Structures are given as C-alpha cells and as structure tokens.
Image (cartoon, rainbow, N blue to C red):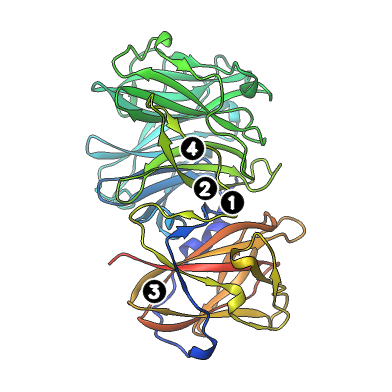
Amino acid sequence: MDKKTWLKGGLAVLLLGTTLSGGSFDAAQAAPAQEKNDFYNVIMQDGADPFMYRHADGYYYFTKTTGGNVTLWRSKTLTGIDAAETTVVETGGQNVWAPEIHRIDGAWYIYYAKDDGDNANHRMYVMQNKSLNPLKGTWVDKGPITDSTNRWAIDGTVFKARGISYFVWSGWEGTENVRQVLYIARMSNPWTIDSPRVEIARPEYQWETNHTPNVNEGPQILVKGNQINIVYSASGSWTDDYSLGLLTAKNNSDLLDPASWTKRPDQVFKTGGGIYGPGHASFTTSPDGQEDWIVYHAAKRQGSGWDREIRTQPFTWNADKTPNFGIPLDPNQPIPLPSGEPERDRYEAEDGRLAGTAKVSQHADSSGGAKVGYIDNEESYVEVDVEVDKSGTYILYARTGNGTAGGSWSTLKLSVDGGPASDFFVTNQGWDNWGTSTQKMTLDKGKHTIRFSKGNGYAEIDGFDLFRIGK
C-alpha cells in the first residue's frame, strides 16, 4: 500500500473531536442503545503486515506497512487501535515493509525493511528509542542488521531463548528472486547479528509453491512452555491462497541447527469463513491477559490481492503446545470482546432520523437486519441521538460499506450536535461487504446527536458502537 493511500484512509483516525456539550435531543425520537460485549472484528479497514504488542504499561503498541515511514499507534484497547494516538517515524528510505516494535533490555526497537526504490536492495534496519513511551523521545538509527552475506531481507523479528537473542527473517539465497527462505542467526545485541545465517524453512509443500516466486515470509514467535513456535506466511501475498504455516523447536535444542526445526505439512490458518488470504499475523493478549488473540491481514474481498484489511480473533492451544487458530471467523457475526475491554452502546442506523434521499434497506448481513444507504445529495443524512453517562474520550466504531464504481475511497460527513463536520473515511470493498470506520471524540455527560451526511462518493452505514476509553 502506498503512502498516499494510507494518509487518505488514516485521516479519520487522526481527527480528534472538540469537547462537545449536550445538544438538542428529542427523547421520543431517540434511537435505543443496546449494551453490547461483542464487536465485528475488522479493527482497521485498510492495511497489511500488522504487528501488535501489549506492554506491561497496559498499552497496545501497533504498527503496519504504511509506505515510506514507520507509523506507531498506542491504545488501551485492542479493538480501539484504529482511533488511537499516533506518531510517524521517518526512515529515509522507500518501500518500508512490515515494521515491528519490541521492548528489549530497557529500550524500544523498531525492526523494518526498506530499499532505495529498487526491490533488489531491500534490507533490514533497526532504530532505538530509550524513552518509556515510544511515541515520545528520539528514535536513533542503528543502521542495517545483516549477516555476512548481506542478501535481500525482509520481515525480521527477534526473540530470546535460554538468555540468547536470535533474529529470524525472510531472505533470498542468492541475488535473484527465485524463492524466499526463512533464516535464523544469533545476535550479540539488539542491532547486531554475530553468527552465519542458517536456513530453517523453505517453500516445499503444494500450498507453499503454488505461485511464483515461492514464498516463506512473515515469521512470528509464539512460545508455550518449552515449545518455540514460529508462525510464518506462505504462498503469494497477492493471492487468496496466502496462509499461515508452522515451524516448531524445543527451547533446549540447538536453534542454529536446522535439524532442531520441524515444519508442519499443512496450513494452520487459511481462507475460510468468508475471509480470503489471511496471513502475516502477530499475537497479543486481551487487556486482562486472560486470552490469546491473533491479529492478521486478509483480502478485503475475494481476489482483491494487496488491497487488505486487518482483523483479529481469539485462539487457543493444542495439547502439544502449538497454537490452534481454527478458521477465520464469519465477518457478519459479532464475536465477544477481548476480555477486559469496556462494553459499548450499539446504535442501529435504521433507528435514526433520515433526510433527503437517505433510506433504510433490509439485508441479512446487516446488524439488526437493516442498513441506511442512498445518502446521495447534500440534503441527505441519517442522525442518531445518543446519551453518555460520563464525560470523557469516546471511540465511535462504525460498520460502513462502500461499493462506489471505480474503487475509490468515499467519505461521509460526521458531525456532533450540529458542530463542524469532519471527513469520515470508508474504504471501497463492495456493497454489503462491511468494514469498520472509527473516530475519536470528546463528549460531555449527557445527550448528543451524531449525524452522517453526504461526503465524497457514496457510502452506507449499518450502525455504530460508542464506548469510553480511559478514566
């Protein structure tokens, strides 16, 4: 995804509403709120290569591929990450792919791939920040991280076993793009490799070799007891065949010996449940630490290739201490919130007031069985009356759709209590194929009216959740 596209979609995240006092409200016309402890599991309507880390400070730190920089998000909730505070870290390069953020020995590190405009020159790089909050302080460029071959490299990640640090990445054997292989090497510090690279996996099964070039990439570490699991992505990331595979080794084995690693012959997460091409996952826990969650990207629709969204769902463990991801969950069925997240009030758009050409349509995949569309001219809108019992910062988490011809983003105009309208971005993934648009706003205790009116292009709204964050 190019930087221009991300900036367009990300503006809705960065717009913070001003403090809003109670507006006009007609109780007879109020849309009834339903208290909910579930959600629809698109957490970002656009993006790829998600990396989510929950730190001991109670915050989720998140990054994804954004083009020419590394963008960091910081949120108290997993599901509210799209509306979280952000910062941009410049890299001085191009084609910045799959960044990760790690806390190691009292400092923050970003690992990322970049090139100079030529893919053949992709290499891994490291930045360091000694601030307690990685959205503050100074990021120091520690330079490239590479073994002695200095070959093409992407998707680097780090872990420790028995006090030894290791770097795992996807790279080329030679100087041509024949296949991508997974390598491991020992590290002497968070920015230095001090051993030869060792191959631990290459594409070999049919589901790994069904597109050219053959690909093993996106390694991620999951440790359970004495078991080290490397969950990796395979097949073409531009296809619906993209999926997750699994490598395992024992913590007490020689991790630089290829014989210590066993590859499972079948995928552990693949197309299913109405979701296509799930891959490049990362792993985190619920806010209370009681549940394990996978965060992954998937195609926005069948055949959409590199046009992707970010989803999440819980996972469990098998008796052999390998992860059990199941299948991608039905996108039209809400799932329980991560344990420890605040409940939210859900409002159905069809219960609001409509004007102009806006109208209610019935549809089985809509929340509540109906949606509001045809917001087609400047006089058209749907507005919903809400009430909040405490003043504070709230996230509006809306289920939105856009199938405008030409594939462009659309906007609705979002306003509260008749105040200034801001652009509320809706990605294009086809009608009745719902995504999630979010916005953060500050609301005073009391009653408010939220209006969605005509913006650029065309968009529908199924409904929205409203929940308070912070104290």
Coordinates of residue 314 in the picture (x, y in percent): 44, 44
Find the distance from the CA under tag 3 to the CA under tag 1. Answer: 29 Å
Determine contact: label 3, label 2, CB under 8 Å.
no
Pointer 2: what residue?
311
Secondary structure at badge 4 equals: strand
Task: Indicate which disc residue 331 carries.
Answer: 1
Amino acid at the residue labelled 1: Pro
Determine contact: label 2, label 1, CB under 8 Å.
yes
262 left or right, relative to 165 = right
Amino acid at the residue labelled 4: Ala
Sequence-wise, the earlier of marks 2 and 4 is 4
Find the distance from the CA under tag 2 to the CA under tag 4. Answer: 10 Å
- Mark 2 nearby-residue class (10 Å; few <14, some 14–19, many ≥20): many
Snapshot quadrant of residue 19 = bottom left
Sequence-wise, the earlier of marks 2 and 1 is 2
Coordinates of residue 201 in the picture (x, y in percent): 50, 17
Label 3 vs label 4, nearer the camera: 4
* Residue at horizontal 67 percent and vertical 54 percent from the top: 429
Pointer 3: what residue?
442
- Residue 447 against residue 341 in the figure, above or below: below
Amino acid at the residue labelled 3: Thr
Label 2 vs label 1, nearer the camera: 1
Coordinates of residue 414 in the picture (x, y in percent): 55, 74
Pointer 4: what residue?
281
